Image (spheres, helix red, strand yellow):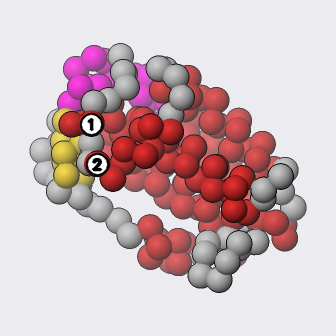
């Protein structure tokens, strides 16, 4: 079963994501985030989803798209490593991905549907892993990482961006 990863299980630049996850049950956090993300974005109108808090920053909709891309990539990394992949998995440039995806041109509902389906699929995937799969280590972007750490990174990455949306885009 997953436990909070040790700093040796992932690159140091993911530390802020792992630290952002509250509690000790990452599967519970991943499940709860499904509703949290949907409720947050369903509470925004069209103009709000296109809002950027500064020039050169992503729109709120692009932030959601970035969460979608990252969810897919981190989930794929977890699957590959759980299955014993020994090759280093590719990195990605999140800014290039957001530009290429043109999320502001897509209907919000479409992005939310895709994110929800992917999160549910990733959650089911993580729940299917045995202890051996959870402890497997591999390499992504030429850096060592465990399956366990990737689950925490996914959850913390979403928490990080939700915090940014609340603090910089839509402060109360």
Q: Is label 1 in a helix, a strand or a loop?
A: helix
Between 40 and 167, the one nearer to me in the picture: 167
- Give left or right: position of 114 versus 8: right
- Residue receiving disc 2: 12
Q: Residue at x 73, y 44 (%)?
A: 38
Does residue 56 show up?
yes
Residue tagged 1: 7
Decide whether the magenta segment is chiefly helix, strand or loop: helix
Check the image and report above or below for 121 versus 61. above
Label 2 CA crowd tier, 10 Å (few <14, some 14–19, many 20+): few
Q: Which residues are magenta?
A: 121-136
Residue in front for this viewpoint, 154 or 73: 154
Image coordinates for residue 15, horizontal then vertical, percent: 37, 44
- Tell me if 156 is positioned left or right of 112 in this view: left
Of callouts 1 and 2, the N-terminal one: 1
Does residue 131 show up magenta in the picture?
Answer: yes
Q: Position of residue 101 (x, y in %)?
A: 54, 72
Disc 1/disc 2 C-alpha distance (Å): 7 Å
Specify the farthest residue to the bottom: 55
Residue at 44 percent across and 76 percent down: it is 96
Q: Residues within 10 Å of mark 1 (few under 14, many from 20)?
A: few
């Amino acid at each position: 079963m997953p436990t909070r990863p040790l700093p040796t299980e992932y690159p140091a630049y993911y530390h802020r994501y792992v630290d952002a996850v509250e509690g000790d049950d990452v599967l519970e956090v991943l499940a709860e985030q499904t509703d949290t993300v949907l409720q947050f974005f369903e509470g925004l109108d069209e103009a709000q989803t296109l809002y950027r808090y500064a020039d050169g920053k992503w729109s709120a909709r692009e932030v959601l798209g970035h969460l979608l891309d990252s969810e897919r990539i981190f989930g794929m990394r977890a699957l590959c490593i759980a299955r014993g992949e020994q090759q280093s998995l590719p990195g990605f440039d999140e800014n290039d991905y957001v530009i290429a995806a043109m999320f502001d041109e897509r209907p919000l509902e479409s992005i939310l549907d895709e994110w929800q389906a992917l999160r549910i699929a990733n959650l089911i995937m993580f729940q299917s892993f045995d202890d051996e799969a959870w402890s497997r280590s591999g390499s992504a972007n030429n850096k060592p990482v465990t399956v366990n750490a990737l689950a925490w990174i996914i959850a913390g990455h979403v928490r990080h961006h939700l915090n940014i949306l609340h603090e910089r885009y839509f402060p109360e």
